[in-house]
Amino acid sequence: MKKAFAVLAVLALGAAGLLWWYVAHTSGANPADAGELFKYGSIGAEGTSLPTALWKALPDVCPDLLPGGYASLGFVYEPGRDRPIGITERTVGVPRAAFNCATCHVGTVRASAGAPPQIVIGMPAHRLDVQRYTRFVMACIDSDRFTPARVMPIVEAKTRLSRLDAFMFRFVLLPGTKREVHKLRARFAWFDTRPDFGPGRFDDFNPYKPDMSHDTTIGASDMPAIWNQAAREGHLRHWDGNATSLRESSINSALGAGATPSSLNLPALAAIEGYLSGLPPPAYPFAVDRGRAAEGERVFAAQCASCHAPGSPGAGKVTAIADVATDRHRLDTFTQQVADITNRQGEGFPWQFHGYHPSTGYVNVLLDGIWARAPYLHNGSVPTLRDLLDPPAERPQVFYRGSDVYDTARVGFRPEAFPGGFRFDTRQPGNGNAGHLYGTALSAAEKDALVEYLKTR
């Protein structure tokens, strides 16, 4: 009996020590500058994320699973930074690396393969392969090579740890991370029953359904641009218009990035919303034929403005799937049951969701900065604006995603095969490029003029 009490006492002291260590090691202030906050600030997702030291070490733990490291996945690095835009660091027990809003909403553009990339804030992260990143992390941590004996030397070669932190890594963090990832890998087994998402795309709602064992829906869609939010006040949110509130949409995105209802950094999210409300769309960085663009403006006014111009009757509203006739898989993912589950998020908190609802089609989005939002349609199935103006039978069936080299003639990213490019097949479920026939009956000259004008939006 005394021995049992002694064991319990040691365990109690150990638990108290762990609690002290966790509380005493929780810190990290956000940048005061709104732009830096957007790129590197915490939104509260660190508690469920990987320790930074482990995150940095993983590519060396499993080099065969990720040749080229994180940059090969399309993460955007600024000179002098040891982690990419969209990866935050805050101490919760230990420094932890987590996603924030910029992870999916910063991209790059280049004039040619040899040119330096231009970073564009607020554009879709069209080169980032979140699914491949998730698969890498799960496969590496759930593998036989992920043992303290193998991992700790790699971690300590990259990050100097205190004796206490090294002890916690070896005996608590690494075993606990492996257990959690093993469960997570089973939960995401449905990844393998659908076409791969590819860079610049993710499934926004299926990952958060409680049970995917009998669900066959496909929700993969393009990451959207998020600048100029003030002009979108009152517009329906997300590709299918299943939400009405920017605040609910931003909180839901933070939860998707790994925050929990109790860890959300609401002041940071409010500051980011304010920043994005006033963030202008990026100016087209290449030459524009102003004469042809003026001709295209007249075409736009006649053919496109009623749905896509600010203040127009259709802007920010849903066009029924029977009319737009684009791929409906994303639409069918968000059922009334999913809306009910989503609206239960935040129960007991002042921000509990109320506005999520099933939709009947896809939203008519504003076209500001449309040149930087390729590929096109909600699922990114059409590589360039010029392709979108062709009838579906003439649009490319197969093209390559993940390049940031720009095609100034057709307005989009170069669709040809390149090393590391993702082969996107529009014949696969969820990838259909049909529909949106608006403008397809224009003459070739009118189409070219319209595309030239859209560079200036």
Image: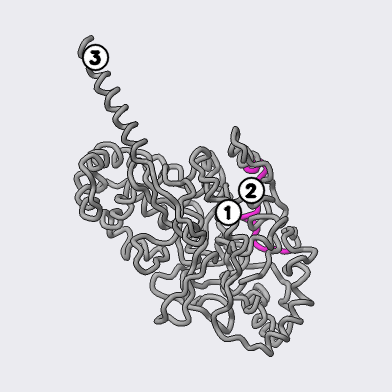
Q: Which residues are magenta?
A: 324-339
From the image, tell me which residue sits under label 2: 334
Closer to the N terminus: mark 2 or mark 3?
3
Which image quarter is the C terminus in? bottom right
Name the quadrant of the N terminus. Answer: top left
* Amino acid type indicated by mark 3: Ala
Q: Quadrant of residue 422?
A: bottom left
Mark 3 packing: few (<14 Cα in 10 Å), some, or many (20+)?
few
CA separation, marks 2 and 1? 8 Å
Mark drawn on residue 4: 3
Q: Which residue is mark 1?
A: 219
Q: Is residue 347 left or right of residue 161?
A: right
Please state if 388 lies on the left or on the right of 260 as rendered. Answer: right
Question: Residue 263 location, x and y as percent?
Answer: 48, 41
Q: Nearer the viewer, residue 95 or 174?
A: 95
Q: Are marks 2 and 3 in contact (CB under 8 Å)?
A: no
Residue 186's place in the image compared with 126, above or below, is above
On the image, the x and y values in percent for residue 96 come to 37, 48
**Circles 2, 1 touching at the beta carbon (< 8 Å):** yes
Q: Nearer the viewer, residue 379 or 260?
A: 260
Give me the C-alpha separation between circle 3 and circle 1.
53 Å
Circle 3: element type: helix
Viewer-nearest of labels 2 and 3? 3
Q: Which is nearer the eye, 57 or 215?
A: 57
Q: What residue is shown at x 50% (from left), y 58% (from top)?
A: 38
Image position, residue 254 (x, y; %): 52, 49
Decide which of 121, 65 is in the foreground and name it: 121
